[in-house]
């Protein structure tokens, strides 16, 4: 009997581990019955009871009509009460975009071969030529300090940007644009942001959510032909006005409205809109010629249909239209890109001309915005964040070598090594995530949840990287001036955190909220079935869900006990264990998430601290996947190995922290206890990347030139006379050449052939004693001068100072 029991259990667990719930029950029942025949009966009652239970479970799993009548019929009404109720705007937001790798992570059994086999299209020859041509040229022409003093881009830079069609990156070639891929677009913004955030934001906005993108996807042919060519060449400068004083994060609450009215114009009766709005924070508004406007369209006289409130609608309003007040500027943290309010008072415009998509577009504004954001959130702010992080890596790698204190380059101090490792590791992780997500866009996906993850988690990582970089550069990061390239990124951090969905909201509501409904294999189907009162569909969804929970619970438990060893992993020797750990956490995430939904129902939506932690777990699963994918696709160097391991270990630790946080705070305590036993039976054992690994990562940007360059491939490196990064790079080159000579001197001191002396006095002694040649002495002096220059800060005449920005 024991053997039969063990055999049935093992077969059941193996099949359930592989996600085959129905087969697992059938096989267990079969083995039990066969065992009964072969072994004989010791305790008939026990055998019969177990057999009946197993057969009943197998039947429930495998015979839908039976379970529909016995179970689903009764639980469907109860489900209707606990499932989250979705308003129209919420439903449209949740349903925007497509489900991609995020679906695999939610399923608890990610197929790593699918990820590793994913080959996004590479940059085209045109795109590469643009990056190396106009983008580098624009970077060369940009003087960001001058931009700050002018409080705007100089006219010749505006002209260059327009002439080279920077504003038309997303506009198809047939309309005169560049027709770039998402990755090319992102890399252009990244490179520009390494030189001037003002220029990057200026270029970014017409290429993100706004008139251009809305027209491409939803405009009428006439509207496309009219506006797209002019937007591509910068003849029209667009802005997009959604946010108002009353409607920030809750953008759908906009009080801007357009009333449908008839007017007689030149003897003809024209149907139009009388628009009133107050918008603020609108990027490019002060210089815009074409305003993309989101407003609520109302038809009180029922001129269009029987419905008075037709919902959120998007329109294009030319700046010159009477009633438009535009031109005032906000001052966003001193970063001088154009940003300001727009007010419209009784602005009248012909409806068919201005509503995007014509009459068919009426009331579809919210869907247009959500669908565009599903793609756009993966591009603009992630690109800016990667630019800032790569720049910080480039600067700090050089500065920590060039800057000496206590007669030692500061990069050799462990205290500096720690933030350096964070800077380099996060930069690797952020770039990997950006590349993977843009790749998905270029492959035709609209990955909404990964886009939200990119927006929130890459901007947060940027905040960490820039803060660390400021600490490493210390005083020289604080004194503003042309030499200081970090302070501008520091100023811009809160902008990245806030725009396109402020991070607190994105983390605590959107990432998990959308993930739970869209990426979960069954929840969306359950909601739709309940809404449609479709018992058959509900039955299939709910039993699929039960099967998912049971099999993933078994999987999570077995993986936790085995240190993830039973998990399938791609045949990659060096990273195999990480794939396995992530598979384990994916299963753990599935059951924790299902338990939270199951015990809290619709109220989980308001438990933002819990859903924020679930968002963290999902986000770091995604980021870690991106790091593994990057490592798989790139050269297997020692530095890449350290960077990838650091990234994945950080993610594993954060996933664990997030799951432990959910378990610690889940209101239904017995469920939390059972979950803890299932997913952390041996305790929470993952730790942040070890010091030794951090040291290897820091060395990658201090000592491995190739790794430093690869890690910062998007940064524009200016010539040596540039007072910021240019001088620092030149000083680094000289410092590196001086290292063997300095070693020679130090060895001589150690051997007792030279007296100990500080700095250049030791060089003099070395020259006099013949330890180094005149040429070597000159090189040391050059390196010292370059160092002095690179660590110098700006100082201003008192009168000049008063006029500075
Ligand atoms: C420099 C800059 C440029 C911008 N450019 C544009 C533009 O071109 N066009 C445009 O239309 N808009 C633009 N915006 C607006 C931007 O998108 C909004 O600022 C943003 O959506 C947040 O709105 P808010 O600032 O009013 O914050 P609020 O909505 O007042 O939010 C305040 C805080 O509450 C949090 N919060 C709100 N609701 C919740 C919730 N349910 N749960 C948890 N936390 C919540 C938010 O995360 C935030 O931390 C820009 C803003 C800035 C600063």
Image (spheres, rainbow, N blue to C red):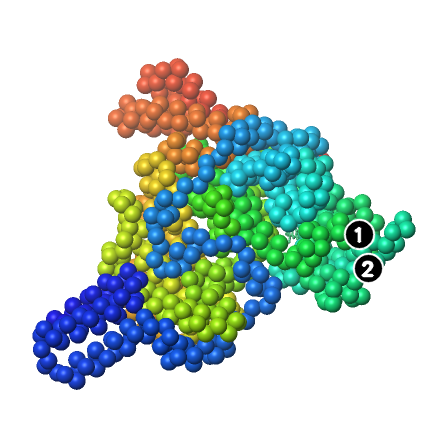
Q: Which residue is mark 2?
A: 261
**The C terminus lies in quadrant:** top right
- Location of residue 580 in the rendering, given as x and y in whole percent from the top left corner: 29, 53
Total number of numbered discs in the rendering: 2
Using the image, tell me which numbered label, if any, was put on residue 349: 1
CA separation in Å, label 2 and label 1? 10 Å
> Where 172 falls versus 545 (above or below)?
above
> Where 165 falls versus 501 (above or below)?
above
Instruction: Give neighbour class at mark 1: few <14, some 14-19, many 20+ (Cα, 10 Å).
Output: many
167 displayed left or right of 518: right
Q: Secondary structure at mark 2?
A: strand
Instruction: Give neighbour class at mark 2: few <14, some 14-19, many 20+ (Cα, 10 Å).
Output: many
- Location of residue 233 in the rendering, given as x and y in whole percent from the top left corner: 68, 34
Name the residue rendered at 37%, 21% in the picture.
765
Frontmost residue, 778 versus 95? 95
The answer, for residue 790, to whether it is visible in the render is no
347 displayed left or right of 558: right
Name the residue rendered at 30%, 66% in the picture.
21
6 displayed left or right of 414: left
349 displayed left or right of 448: right
- Location of residue 710 in the rendering, given as x and y in whole percent from the top left corner: 42, 34
Frontmost residue, 47 versus 559? 47
- Location of residue 1 in the rendering, given as x and y in whole percent from the top left corner: 12, 75
Quadrant field for ligand 1:
bottom right
> Where 214 falls versus 179 (above or below)?
below
The answer, for residue 645, to whether it is visible in the render is yes
Mark 2 CB in 8 Å range of ligand 1?
no
Furthest toward the bottom, the residue is 45
Q: Secondary structure at mark 1?
A: strand
Frontmost residue, 389 versus 211? 211
Please tell me in which quadrant of the rendered image residue 409 appears. Answer: top left
**Badge 2 or badge 1: first in the primary sequence:** 2
């Amino acid at each position: 009997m024991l053997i039969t029991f063990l055999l049935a259990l093992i077969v059941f667990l193996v099949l359930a581990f592989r996600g085959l719930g129905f087969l697992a029950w059938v096989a267990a029942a079969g083995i039990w019955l066969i065992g009964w025949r072969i072994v004989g009966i010791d305790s008939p009652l026990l055998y019969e009871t177990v057999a009946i239970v197993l057969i009943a479970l197998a039947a429930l799993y495998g015979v839908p009509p039976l379970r529909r009548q016995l179970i689903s019929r009764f639980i469907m009404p109860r489900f209707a009460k606990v499932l989250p109720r979705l308003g129209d705007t919420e439903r449209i937001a949740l349903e925007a975009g497509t489900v991609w790798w995020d679906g695999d992570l939610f399923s608890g059994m990610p197929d790593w071969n699918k990820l590793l086999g994913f080959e996004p299209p590479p940059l085209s020859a045109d795109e590469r030529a643009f990056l190396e041509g106009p983008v580098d040229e624009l970077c060369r022409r940009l003087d960001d300090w001058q931009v700050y003093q002018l409080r705007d881009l100089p006219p010749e830079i505006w002209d260059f940007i327009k002439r080279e069609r920077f504003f038309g990156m997303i506009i198809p070639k047939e309309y005169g644009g560049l027709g770039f891929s998402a990755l090319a677009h992102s890399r252009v913004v990244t490179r520009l942001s390494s030189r001037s955030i003002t220029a990057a934001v200026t270029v970014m906005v017409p290429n993100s959510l706004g008139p251009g993108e809305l027209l491409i996807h939803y405009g009428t042919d006439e509207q496309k032909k009219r506006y797209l060519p002019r937007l591509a060449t910068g003849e029209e400068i667009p802005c997009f006005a959604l946010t108002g004083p009353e409607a920030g994060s809750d953008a759908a609450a906009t009080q801007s409205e357009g009333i449908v009215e008839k007017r007689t114009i030149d003897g003809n009766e024209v149907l139009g809109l009388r628009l009133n709005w107050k918008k603020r924070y609108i990027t490019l508004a002060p210089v815009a010629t074409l305003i993309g406007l989101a407003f609520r369209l109302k038809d009180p006289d029922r001129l269009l249909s029987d419905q008075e409130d037709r919902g959120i609608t998007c329109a294009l309003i030319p700046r010159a239209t009477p009633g438009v007040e535009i031109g005032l500027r906000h001052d966003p943290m001193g970063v001088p890109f154009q940003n300001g309010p727009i007010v419209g008072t009784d602005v009248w415009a012909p409806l068919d001309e201005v509503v995007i998509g014509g009459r068919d577009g009426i009331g579809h504004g919210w869907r247009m915005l959500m669908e565009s954001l599903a793609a756009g959130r993966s591009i603009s702010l992630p690109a800016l964040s990667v630019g800032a992080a790569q720049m910080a890596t480039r600067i700090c790698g050089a500065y920590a070598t060039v800057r000496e204190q206590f007669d030692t380059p500061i990069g050799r101090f462990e205290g500096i090594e720690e933030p350096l490792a964070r800077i380099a590791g996060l930069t690797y992780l952020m770039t990997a995530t950006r590349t993977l997500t843009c790749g998905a866009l270029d492959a035709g996906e609209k990955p909404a949840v990964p886009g939200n993850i990119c927006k929130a988690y890459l901007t947060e990582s940027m905040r960490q990287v820039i803060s660390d970089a400021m600490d490493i550069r210390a005083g020289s990061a604080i004194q503003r001036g042309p030499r200081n390239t970090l302070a501008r990124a520091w100023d811009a951090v809160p902008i990245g955190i806030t725009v396109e969905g402020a991070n607190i909201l994105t983390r605590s509501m959107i990432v998990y909220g959308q993930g739970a409904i869209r990426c979960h294999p069954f929840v969306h189907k359950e909601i739709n079935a309940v809404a449609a009162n479709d018992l058959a569909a509900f039955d299939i969804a709910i039993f699929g869900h039960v099967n998912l929970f049971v099999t993933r619970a078994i999987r999570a438990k077995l993986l936790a006990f085995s240190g993830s060893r039973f998990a399938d992993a791609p045949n990659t020797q060096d990273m195999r264990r990480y794939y396995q750990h992530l598979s384990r956490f994916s299963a753990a995430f599935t059951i924790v998430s299902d338990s939270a939904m199951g015990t809290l129902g619709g109220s989980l939506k308001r438990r933002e601290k819990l859903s924020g932690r679930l968002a963290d777990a999902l986000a770091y699963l995604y980021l870690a996947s991106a790091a593994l994918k990057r490592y798989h696709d790139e050269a297997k160097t020692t530095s890449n190995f350290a960077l990838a391991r650091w990234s994945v270990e950080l993610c594993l630790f954060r996933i664990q922290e997030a799951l432990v946080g959910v378990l610690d705070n889940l209101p239904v305590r017995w469920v939390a206890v059972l979950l803890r036993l299932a997913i952390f039976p041996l305790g929470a054992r993952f730790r942040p990347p070890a010091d030794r690994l951090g040291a290897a990562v820091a060395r990658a940007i201090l000592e491995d030139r190739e790794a430093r360059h690869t890690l910062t491939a998007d940064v524009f490196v200016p010539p040596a006379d540039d007072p910021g990064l240019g001088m620092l790079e030149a000083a680094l080159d000289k410092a590196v050449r001086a290292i063997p000579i300095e070693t020679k001197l130090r060895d001589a001191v150690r051997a007792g052939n030279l007296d100990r002396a500080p700095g250049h006095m030791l060089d003099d002694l070395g020259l006099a004693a013949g330890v180094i040649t005149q040429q070597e002495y000159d090189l040391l002096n050059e390196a010292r001068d370059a160092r002095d220059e690179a660590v110098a800060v700006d100082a201003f005449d008192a009168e000049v100072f008063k006029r500075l920005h």
